[in-house]
Amino acid sequence: MTEDLRRIARRRAGAKLGLYIHAGVYIAVNAFLAVVQWQATPHLHWNLWPLAGWGLGLAIHATAVLLGASGLRERMEAEELKKLESR
């Protein structure tokens, strides 16, 4: 059982670290794009499109990671297993 818990903890920690890296890259790249947009075309705010699109992807990533960390999937799997075993 201890090895199973370690595996789950390692997976969750990896997912959270991946989310933090994703968020950091999102901030760095979009800050760079904002500077380029401000320097090259101050009258045209094209940088908002990648900001919004990538932001949606980041929000979905965060939702998946945070729901996974809540143990929701494990509880649902346990319920399904219980239903299948009772048949």
Image: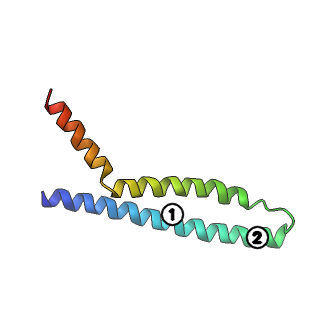
The residue lying at 68 percent from left, 71 percent from top is 32
Q: Does dot 1 land on a helix, a strand or a loop?
A: helix
Q: Position of residue 29 (x, y in %)?
A: 63, 67
Q: Position of residue 24 (x, y in %)?
A: 53, 70
Q: Residues within 10 Å of mark 2 (few under 14, many from 20)?
A: few
The residue lying at 60 percent from left, 58 percent from top is 55
- Location of mark 2 (residue): 36
In the picture, measured across the screen, residue 77 lies left or right of residue 27, that is: left
Up the image or down, 49 lies above or below 37; here it is above
> 31 or 81: nearer the eye?
81
Amino acid beneath label 2: Val
In the picture, measured across the screen, residue 16 lies left or right of residue 3, that is: right
Amino acid beneath label 1: His
**Which colour style is shown?**
rainbow
The residue lying at 56 percent from left, 53 percent from top is 57
Circles 1 and 2, Cβ within 8 Å, touching? The answer is: no
How far apart in space, not on screen, are marks 1 and 2 (Cα)?
21 Å
Sequence-wise, the earlier of marks 1 and 2 is 1
Up the image or down, 50 lies above or below 42; here it is above
Q: Quadrant of the C terminus?
A: top left
Q: Position of residue 5 (x, y in %)?
A: 20, 59
Q: Does dot 2 land on a helix, a strand or a loop?
A: helix
In the picture, measured across the screen, residue 76 lies left or right of residue 58, that is: left
- Location of mark 1 (residue): 22
